Image: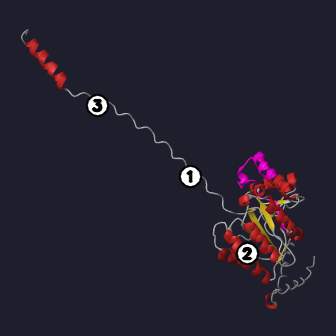
Amino acid sequence: MIRLLPAVFLSLTMHAVAAPKPAPATPAPEPTPAVASAPAAQPATALPADAAAPPPAGQPRSTYSQCHVDGPYVAMTFDDGPHGANTPRLLEMLRQRNIHATFFLVGQCVAEFPDIVKKIVADGHEIANHSWSHPQLSAMSESAVRDQLQRTHDAIIAACGVTPKIMRPPYGAFTARQRAWALGEWGYKCILWDVDPLDWKVRNAEHVKTEILKQAVPGSIILSHDIHKTTVDAMPETLDALLAKGFKFVTVSELVAMDKPVAPKPKATPAPKADAPASAKAEPAAPPAPKDKVKP
């Protein structure tokens, strides 16, 4: 028994050496950080759903995308300027045709080109507020919106001495509450549009002309942008073609002053029911024959 102990010990030792060591635990992979989502797309020009809705009873109308007028009047509007090169070219085109338009000015551009602002006013055009830096106002706080509009309001007055009376929100994005607030704060009517040639997207003069001529009707507010060369290039033929169609050009405020409420459609009078044909008329029932008196 004693002789066997060394052999047993040796066998156990060799087995311990030969046995494979357990593999170290593989650490779980760290979760992959989420990829940041792409920045939200810039909002497209689109009208608020309630743009054409009549105001609540007893409240003034604050939003216009089109006007109901007697006569072939339209308003040309130009956004995002003034532009150092394009706006002076456009002013000359308008002057040659004795056309007055409305310019929705960005405050930063007003501060950069105050002399062009003076020229716009001197030529008899209307100027209006289009925010300071062209953000989406509907997604901003009231204090931020106030800063955007007030700075531009003040810059326009400083440049030309004229107080703007109307505004256009960038992208047409302005909530009903903001519209009511801007009307109460600055007296601003919110001006949208019903003709959009998408000149900011399709930089082609022929396209701009074709779309404006196709969409314009009496009372239209026509949207365009004088910061784009192709838009200004389109204006001579576009304006001449509108004049040839008999359209007359006014500023937005002049068009709004002409606006008349649309008369409600009269309710249809129900047609009288037709008489039933004579053959279908039931004959009156014959009176019952008198019964013979029964003697008591």
**Which picture quadrant has residue 160?**
bottom right
The magenta stretch spans residue 235: no
Residue bearing the label numbered 2: 235
| Place of residue 29 in the rendered image (x, y in percent of width and height, measured from the top left) | 40, 38
- Judging depth in this view, the residue of 113 and 186 nearest the camera is 113
Residue bearing the label numbered 1: 38
Q: Which residues are magenta?
A: 125-151
Lower sequence index among marks 2 and 3: 3
- Judging depth in this view, the residue of 166 and 176 nearest the camera is 166
In the drawing, what numbered circle is on residue 23?
A: 3
Question: Which label lies toward us, 2 or 3?
Answer: 2
| Place of residue 62 in the rendered image (x, y in percent of width and height, measured from the top left) | 84, 60
Point 76% across, 81% down: residue: 240
Secondary structure under the numbered disc 1 in the rendered image = loop
In the drawing, what numbered circle is on residue 128?
A: none
- Judging depth in this view, the residue of 17 and 273 nearest the camera is 17
Lower sequence index among marks 1 and 3: 3
